[in-house]
Image: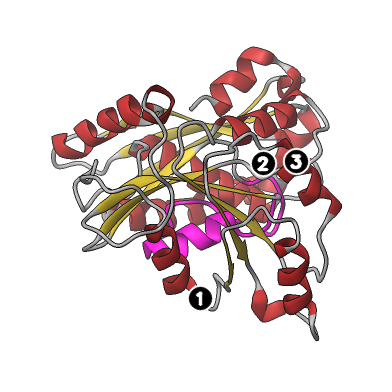
Amino acid sequence: MGSGKIAARAQLQRDSNRGEALSRRDSQPSSGSFRCGFVGVLGRTNVGKSTFLNAILGERLLISSSKPQATRNRIRCVLTTPDAQIIFVDTPGLHRPKNKLSRRLVREAYRGLRGIDVLVYMVEPWGELAAFDRHALERLETPDVPILLLVNKIDQAKSNALEETLIAYEATDRFEELIPISSTRRRGLDDAVETIVKYLPEGEALFPSDVKCDRPEEFLIEEIIREQVFDNTFEEVPYSSAVRVKWFRETAGKTPEIRAEILVARESQKGILVGKGGRMIKRIGSRARTEIERLLGRSVFLDLIVRVAPGWTNDDEEIRQVTEA
């Protein structure tokens, strides 16, 4: 990876919380020159935040799954247009915690809102104000940050559910704008980006235009493998698993070698992941390798091992390593 991208990630770490040290800039939309700012993306788990970001970035940088709680880390994604640079802060989905890991994920979601310039809150067209969202909105402590509502999955809305959803959320008087979208059908995405840009402060770009994510390749590889664990296993296994790249070796003239460890909480979960005759781990490895090669643009050798760490989802140190920003 080039030094420019490495430097950009370092710059992002230095600037990510700059809003706490600077006075809050005027958040009202206005015409002007180039705009740049941090945009927090918040919403209930499985609402489609990662799918939305992948769609507007034009690249699958974030894992998505039909199962909830796929996102565990705050991930910063960068969209650069001729007029603006939006630094999205994707956060873990909001949910009701069941163990130390899930409590940490909810805390990380709210921590990710520190220093942002705009907050995007995403919901689905349920036809009413969900009690969960009412509680989450009451918990928000961002009085000077404009909040935009994205109503995702409008292609799935029935009857008058979309209109009723917009009316219900507008009645909270918490949102500057309400924008219906469908991330999978790519409906309303341009409108969403244009609206977000209006609320960004004027300022120079913080990243080169080719930077789309603040995470190193190893992290993206871990996420790809974890996505396959989510997609190919069931019940408690996805939520009790974590992935760590143990090494990523690149030698001139040789196929890059990657060894990754899949962590689970119980022996029975290891048995499910490995599968009869090793079939499950081979399937996960094969599908993950395809996606990793797409990401890196070259062939790789991928070796997966499964390790049991009893009760790791309630172990503070293990959780810190898995969720640290």
Q: Reading the chain from its start, which is encountered first: label 1 or label 3?
A: 3
The kind of secondary structure element at disc 1 is loop
Q: How far apart are marks 2 and 1 (CA)?
A: 42 Å
Position of residue 80 in the picture relative to residue 124 (left or right): left
Residue 191 image position (x, y, % from top left): 45, 72
Point 55% across, 21% down: residue:
321
Point 53% across, 39% down: residue:
144
Assess whether residue 8 is covered by the magenta stretch.
no
Query: Which residue is disc 2 drawn over?
Result: 274
Q: Which amino acid does label 2 sit on?
A: Val
Residue 267 image position (x, y, % from top left): 77, 28
Point 57% across, 58% down: residue:
176
Q: Which colour scheme is used?
A: secondary structure
Q: Reading the chain from its start, which is encountered first: label 2 or label 3?
A: 3
| Outermost top residue | 317
Q: Reading the chain from its start, which is encountered first: label 2 or label 1?
A: 1
> Magenta region: which residues?
45-70
Query: Which residue is disc 3 drawn over?
Result: 138
Give the foreground label among 1 and 3: 3
Q: In this view, does 5 lie above or below 80?
A: above
Query: Which residue is disc 1 drawn over?
Result: 188
Q: Which amino acid does label 3 sit on?
A: Glu
Position of residue 120 in the picture relative to residue 292 (left or right): right
Q: Is residue 49 above or below residue 219?
A: below
